[in-house]
Image: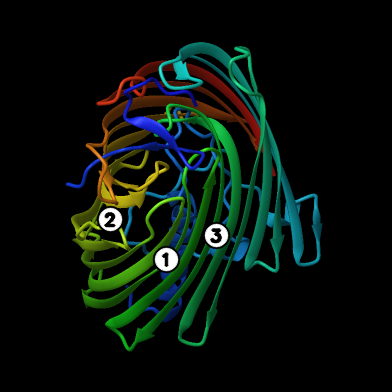
Amino acid sequence: MATARGSPYERRDGVTGLRGVRRPSHNWGRLNGTLLITMLLSLLALARAAEAQEVINPPPQPSVTPPSLQQIQPGKMGVIQPAETAQSVPEATQPFQWGPMNLKPHLLYRFLYGNGIQSSPGQPLTTAIHEIAPGLLLGVGGHWTLDYTPTWTFYSNHQFRDTLDHAVVLTGGTAYGDWVLGLSQSYVSSDQPLIETGGQTAQETYSTALNASYRFGRAMSVDLAVNQNFTFTEKFTNSREWSTMDWLNYQLWPRFDIGIGVGGGYVDVSPGTDMTYEQYQGRVNWRATDKISFQVRGGLEDRQFLDAGTGDLINPLYGATVQYQPFEATTLSLSANRAVSTSPFQNEVTENTDLSGSLNQRLLERFNLSLGAGYHTGKYIVSAAGFPAGRKDEYYSFNARLSTTFLKRGTIAATYQFSNNSSSVAGYGYSSNQFGLEVGYRY
């Protein structure tokens, strides 16, 4: 990526970098089901946490929750259930089932037309995009799923590269005695326009998560988690991270839990400054009524930069979600999150703050309308001495999706997204409108 003379971006050891400065229920079986489903969803969220922010929203992903767990319907802390993209089909009617193995093909075609999409910093372009994503979801024994989805992407504007991306996700979980155990392993390769890099960027992520939960009697439980996330980004910094976050929970009364958590991690950055960190958090989960629930956590992180000549970076952390379902056909959600992550630029970390809201409304019994809006700030903080001030971004977006089903297993949707990023560094801001059409079919 070429840089102008005097720009805060420059090549260092073959890597383009940004220079900056520091600144339950009482029912045991139902409880185990709740914990297991929650852990599996957390595993998938962790698998995506290492991925950079894409300018183009990724298409809907098939559910990879093992079939036996999908049948568990305990009372949950959250009131909003994930919307299915097509009507569910009974296992007995599945055409590709052999004993304990069940193969579910899925196919998605997406057409997008958008402007303001950058192929490189300062180069906003208009292009049509065609995406074809066939995939296979294999269920084994009810407790394991393995999904593989390749995605071919073709751009009408030849300043973008046509690409073939890959996504593989293995998920498993089981209850053993008083333990609930979960595992997730994923590999994702992508070559999409990214907000952080200001252009189309090849990236690979490998994520592993191991979770365990154990309950001591009626009121007390522990949640244990170990994670490994590797991110390799073409022409930018690579990182290998190992971390843990462990919680001690107490149920004050049904539908109201509190917990305290302690965690830490080590990040190997190449090239750049390695780092360690510790986190201390508390959380509250409260399902106030059948229609509304609250999940809140907060604390701080102390991050150390090894052999960098700088002091510790201490940051507040928080996350909050409010879910509300006033009517059967209407669901609303509000969330906020603050975290610190490694940056694709050498010797930097990013302080990220996110606010978002969504509305899901069923219309005329046949259509589903989804609306979402979000606001994000990213502040790039130097992790080594001797570098001048860094970059700050402000990003906001709005998206809409109107969908319906056909032939039981099919989905068709019209989509729209507006996004805008303002950056303190020239070439990294943009404004984009994207219109799309999706057609999918899955077993």
Q: Viewed as shown, does residue 158 lie left or right of 39?
A: right
Residue, disc 2: 290
Q: Amino acid at mark 2?
A: Asp
Label 3 and label 1: CA atoms lie apart by 11 Å
Residue, disc 1: 74
Q: From where the camera sits, is residue 166 visible? A: yes
Mark 1 crowd level (few <14, some 14–19, many ≥20, 10 Å Cα)? some
Work out whether mark 2 precedes mark 1 in sequence or the reverse, and give the earlier one: 1
Q: Secondary structure at mark 3?
A: helix
Residue, disc 3: 70
The foreground one among 355 and 83 is 355
Classify 259 as above or below 240: below
The foreground one among 232 and 126 is 232
**In the image, what residue occupies the spot 69% across and 60% down?**
139
Classify 434 as above or below 388: above
The foreground one among 229 and 24 is 229
Mark 3 crowd level (few <14, some 14–19, many ≥20, 10 Å Cα)? few
Residue 329 pos. (x, y %): 37, 37
Q: Amino acid at mark 1?
A: Pro
Q: Viewed as shown, does residue 243 lie left or right of 325?
A: right
**In the image, what residue occupies the spot 80% across and 49% down?**
95
Classify 101 as above or below 426: below
Where on the picture, by quarter, is residue 77?
bottom left
Where on the picture, by quarter, is residue 262?
bottom left
Classify 143 as above or below 402: below
Residue 205 pos. (x, y %): 55, 50
The foreground one among 175 and 115 is 115
Q: Viewed as shown, does residue 161 lie left or right of 283?
A: right
Q: Secondary structure at mark 1?
A: loop
Residue 26 pos. (x, y %): 33, 79
Q: Secondary structure at mark 2?
A: loop
* Numbered circle sitting on residue 5: none
